[in-house]
Amino acid sequence: MGSTGDCGNGTAAAAAGGGGLVVPEIKFTKLFIDGEFVDAVSGKTFETRDPRTGDVLAHIAEADKADVDLAVKAAREAFEHGKWPRMSGYERSRVMNKLADLVEQHADELAALDGADAGKLLALGKIIDMPAAVQMLRYYAGAADKIHGEALRVAGKYQGYTLKEPIGVVGVIIPWNFPTMMFFLKVSPALAAGCTVVVKPAEQTPLSALYYAHLAKLAGVPDGVINVVQGFGPTAGAALSSHMDVDSIAFTGSTEIGRTIMESAARSNLKNVSLELGGKSPMIIFDDADVDMAVSLSTLAVFFNKGEICVAGSRVYVQEGIYDEFVKKAVEAAKNWKVGDPFDANTNMGPQVDKVQFERVLKYIEIGKSEGATLLTGGKPTGDKGYYIEPTIFVDVKEDMTISQEEIFGPVMSLMKFKTVEEAIEKANCTKYGLAAGIVTKNLNIANRVSRSVRAGTVWVNCYFAFDPDAPFGGYKMSGFGRDQGMDAIDKYLQVKSVITAVPDSPWY
């Protein structure tokens, strides 16, 4: 089968890295189009590198417009004439559950791929990323046979009802920070709706997406329903977002690229667009909070996944009564946050995803110092090689400073003080973003007031990163629009059609 014939780079990749580092076998490096692994039309490849060392993991087929055209053609054929949209929801759910079974069976291998490709912690990949992906698949498998319209009360001699129909060919563009979770966050509801998809994974982390395409074929997903075209944004991404035969684009990434995708959609066929973009989320800690718990939560909120997470609670606001105690304990926690090989079970934080991101974070740290913020701990590269940065904490941060306003996407905490609830709300909303927020308090009235006042798509009270497939996720303001997760997400991949039929001889109206 085509999906098992792309194993040429495995031996070379396994020997890469050196220094005793575990490097998984790389089995799939080609494009996946119409059920087959194929070379790029141009024959071009690009390197994907191990952020632990900077060494090359594999050479990956590089898609451009010609390859995207072929993938979209395959997806269109599968949608217009294939069986996937014409299966019952129950039949689709069975295939999706079989795919979930296969992901579970290969979870350790897939977690290792993301660990080597993105610098993610292997242990957390096994216990968080992989189970979350499987849960997402099963959630939407369960929803596939529950998509329906409604009867309408139409005035006059008519009967009316609505149909919910798959929107068609969906372009999916996903980021590098959570390659597995983002793949299934977008693909699962699209499959449940009966759509076909063309996925462009981030060029930094293409490996697991190709493996999922392979597993999808083994699970019985028909050819052309899932296509994977890894490549670069200005070529493959631009070709997908501007394609005249793509009906919808689902994107997670930066606000800058989200704006470009909207422009491409407008200039082409006015395709539907959903965007989950950047964030600069506030963590608001009140005087009545348990300080140790608050420090633990804020440390997790900023340094989890090396700060490479759109909802990172990087603006930490602490009420003045506990501020000094909090700062002391937060610095201690940061110093104890172990940076190292993400395959080591004792490591808390691995390397930034690549050299570009590594240098970007260090640049923001220098900007913070130059604008007058006080560096309490961290702020430097660490290790002999690779893209590791120490957990970093700034104080004396003002709302108009760059490190307080711009998304850094790295392990950098900005600690600020406030006096009143009103001030906390005002400061929390002093941002162009609105993706998430955290509140730590024992006072239910404060929790309710602040959660309703902060303009963010998700608010966590006395917790953080509490995601669930049933909880819709998305942003306010420049953090985007549209929702992932929950039944709301399926609506992005559906069209609503009204059907009105004359009933001239009905005994009642």
Image (cartoon, rainbow, N blue to C red):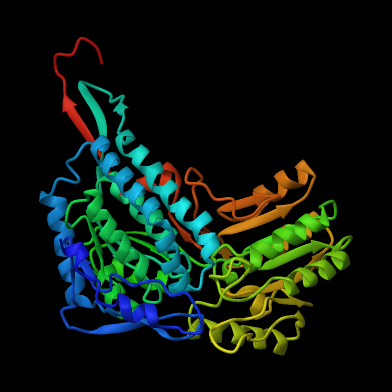
Q: Position of residue 393 (x, y in %)?
A: 73, 76
Give the quarter of the figure containing the N terminus.
bottom left
Give the quarter of the figure containing the C terminus.
top left
Identified at 26% across, 79% down, the residue is 62
Q: Position of residue 273 (x, y in %)?
A: 35, 60
Residue 494 visible within the image: no
* 262 over 226 or under it: above or below: below
Q: Position of residue 20 (x, y in %)?
A: 51, 80
Residue located farthest toward the top when viewing the structure as drawn: 507
The answer to whether 57 appears left or right of 79 in the picture is right
Identified at 34% across, 71% down, the residue is 263
Q: Nearer the viewer, residue 409 or 217?
A: 217
Residue 468 visible within the image: yes
The quadrant in which residue 259 appears is: bottom left
The answer to whether 360 appears left or right of 249 in the picture is right
Identified at 66% across, 88% down, the residue is 366
Residue located farthest toward the left when viewing the structure as drawn: 81
* 213 over 407 or under it: above or below: above
Q: Nearer the viewer, residue 277 or 452?
A: 277
Numbered circles on residues, count: 0
The quadrant in which residue 266 appears is: bottom left
